[in-house]
Amino acid sequence: MPKKIQCGVIGAGWWATFAHIPSLQEHPDVELVAIQNDNPTEAANIAAAFGIPRSYRRVDDLLAKERIDAVIVSSSANLHFHDAYAALDNGRHVLIEKPMTMTAAEAEDLACLAKKRDLQLLVSCPWHYTAHAGEAKRLVRKRELGDIRMLSILMTNPINDLLRGTNTRPTHGQPYMHPRRGTYSDPKVAGAGQIYTQVCHAAAYLTFLTGARPMEVFARFHNDGAVLDIYDTVNLRMDDGSIASIASTGATSLERRDFEVRVFGTKGILFLDLWRGKMEFVPLQGEPRSYPQLLQEEIYPHKAPARNLIESILDPQANLAPAEIGVAAMEVIEGACRSAQRGENILVSSLMERRR
């Protein structure tokens, strides 16, 4: 019988207990042997609740004492770079939560280290694993839309309380635990608000679909009295010559989420409504093509990133959210933050100055 892939989870908190830990434990080729949480009581309780053999307070102890093949980094954003770098440097494959890091340069450093060590590095992007995502990517990459000229994204998700720090109640699923206070509202921990927490999804999806990377970024934020940004608009020029816009906010109804993607090509237009599981391709000549609506459980496959980590270890070609996509998303995010602060257009090339 083949040896199972030994895994650990760094930063075992609300999302890890909701998505990653159950996903690993359901996988027939995986043995989840250890978790890390910097609160020893929380760590021990989570391990006991999920039947995980060992728990650790320090990341370095887990990496030193466990003979594991891979880890999921699900710590707060400010710890992503340190935790992922330590794991890669110790020869472990890594799935890292979004946002990938705090800066584009840090994300590039991780991508380079993974490539140097011949390790898999994935960014946790559940939207990449739907049937519509795969078909949309195929249509774009096979040029059925022709040359891509413009992309437009509207993304809303009711996380206003998390961004303001007024409530830590998650808005997705039934959690085992809540995120810690400040995880999404303290700039030293979260980086920024909506731009880091949600626009990272939209920015990653752009590059996932087209393969294009951002070259220029212009953004405006509105904090609406909060410490961090609540409303964001971002305009981009991509390296394939296309232009793109992203509008996003966490201040929306608890009963409504939007993730609408429009891709305009010289031969047709692609319409995706991700939260409602709808997709339509409208050629400039010919009949529109509507795709079967996704079932509710297919719309946001939150367990898919952890499964894809294992698939990518077994077959590197299976990686649907490689490090390069995370780097591109961080270029959008950091570029947008600089643009909003300075009130000017930002060249992505200026972000890659090493600051470590």
Image (tube, helix red, strand yellow):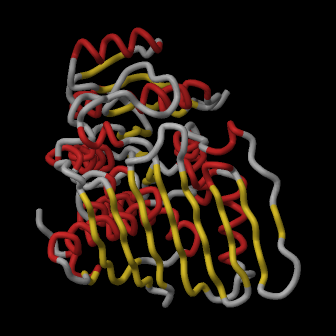
* Image position of 157 with respect to 297: above or below: below
Q: Position of residue 90 (x, y in %)?
A: 30, 44
Say which of 188 and 234 sits in front. 234
Q: Position of residue 51 (x, y in %)?
A: 47, 12
Identify the residue shown where x is 43% and y is 39%: 70
* Image position of 348 with respect to 318: above or below: below
Q: Position of residue 225 (x, y in %)?
A: 19, 50
Identify the residue shown where x is 39% and y is 63%: 115
In the image, is 80 to the left or to the right of 304?
A: left
Quadrant, the N terminus: top right
* Image position of 67 with respect to 151: above or below: above
Residue closest to the far right: 287
Quadrant, the C terminus: bottom left
Q: Position of residue 30 (x, y in %)?
A: 56, 30
Identify the residue shown where x is 75% and y is 81%: 144
Identify the residue shown where x is 40% and y is 58%: 199
User: Which of the 4 image quarters holds residue 332?
Assistant: bottom left
User: Which of the 4 image quarters holds residue 259?
Assistant: bottom right
Residue closest to the far left: 356
Say which of 214 and 162 sits in front. 162
In the image, is 280 to the left or to the right of 182?
A: right
Say which of 272 and 252 sits in front. 252
Labels in figure, total: 0
In the image, is 82 to the left or to the right of 9?
A: left
Say which of 243 and 78 sits in front. 243
* Image position of 107 with respect to 189: above or below: below
